[in-house]
Image (spheres, grey):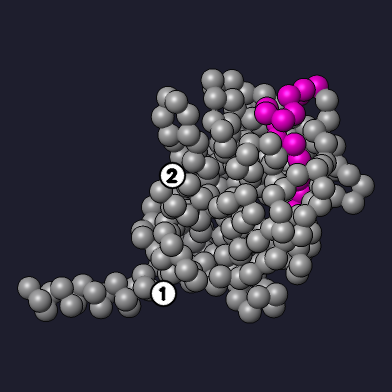
Amino acid sequence: MRALAVTAVLMLVFAGVASADVGPWRTIGSDVARPLDESQGLAVVERPSGTTVKYTGIGTVPASVSSRGWNHVGDPGAGHGYYVEPYQRDDRGAKLFRVQAPDGTWTEYQHALESWEANNNSFAAVSPDGQWMVAGEWGTMTRLLVHPMPGIAFTNPAANLPYASAIRLDRPVRDIQGCDFVTATQLLCSSDDPDGSLFGVTKPLLQVNLAAPVGSSDVAGTVTSLGQLPLQSGCSGTFEVEGIDYDERDGTLRVVVMSPSICILFDSKTWRFHR
């Protein structure tokens, strides 16, 4: 029996499970991430009726939304019973934030791009006080964007959802797929950076410490790489790191990583971590 136990441990180590830890975040397991409807991100939504984990993917975009040009959904966010899905389009048209209230009703809020703003709408993260929403752009950036939280702090869907401020990062980040608040002054972000020149590794988990909680004025953010997110698959090739969620109920961090090639269909993972 002891020999079998040792063999099992060795198999886990050689399979790479032990190396899946990222900085202080210890791997506690993973779940299969379906490429059609779980490939973009996730959010834990707490309501009086119960708690659910909501995923987004190419198969979750409603036809009524894609038919109007918003053909890509990013990593969703949630807070205070509200759930937010960020959408983008291929042109310089407005970004869309589709918000579900605690009672289950949906409302759409549009944000007209600032002249300097990229059209990408990679994620939505709700601040712990529920008053603000952080969103992100693709590419190499030194900022994250802050808006009043639609449905809570901004409640007129007929008006333009305004840009409020920015998180000014102390160093560039690349291809941020998702961020979520751990505290009012700390976010964790998943980066799909394929290059590795910014932090010494590709596909890093980034920690952003804020000088103050987000609000109507810009706030400084200090960026630290905690290490490379787990890239494990039966196929070799290019992985795609996707969205992220921090569950404050039990401190579980979840990150979606899609596998290369044909393996995207059956061994893509939502990794689970604890500190």
Which label belongs to residue 177? none
How many labels, in total? 2
Q: Is residue 40 left or right of residue 12?
A: right
At mark 2, the secondary structure is loop
Identity of the residue drawn at 57% across and 38% down: 78
Q: Residue furthest right?
A: 115
* Disc nearer the start of the sequence (1/2): 1
Residue 93 in sight = no
- Please name the residue that numbered disc 1 is placed on: 19
Give neighbour class at mark 2: few <14, some 14-19, many 20+ (Cα, 10 Å).
few
* Residue 50 horizontal/vertical position (percent): 41, 29
Quarter placement of the N terminus: bottom left
Of 151 and 237, the residue lying toward us: 151
- Picture layout, residue 143 above or below residue 227: above
Residue 275 in sight = yes
Of 59 and 125, the residue lying toward us: 125
Q: Amino acid at mark 1?
A: Ser
Q: Is residue 184 inside the magenta stretch?
A: no
Give neighbour class at mark 1: few <14, some 14-19, many 20+ (Cα, 10 Å).
some
Quarter placement of the C terminus: bottom left
Residue stretch rendered in magenta on the structure: 144-158
Q: Mainly helix, strand or loop, the magenta region? A: loop
* Residue 84 horizontal/vertical position (percent): 62, 36
- Please name the residue that numbered disc 2 is placed on: 249
Looking at the rendering, which quadrant does residue 8 occupy?
A: bottom left
Of 7 and 44, the residue lying toward us: 44
- Picture layout, residue 80 above or below residue 37: above
- Picture layout, residue 251 above or below residue 58: below
Identity of the residue drawn at 58% across and 51% down: 183
* Residue 215 horizontal/vertical position (percent): 75, 44
Q: Is residue 62 left or right of residue 9?
A: right
Q: Amino acid at mark 2?
A: Arg
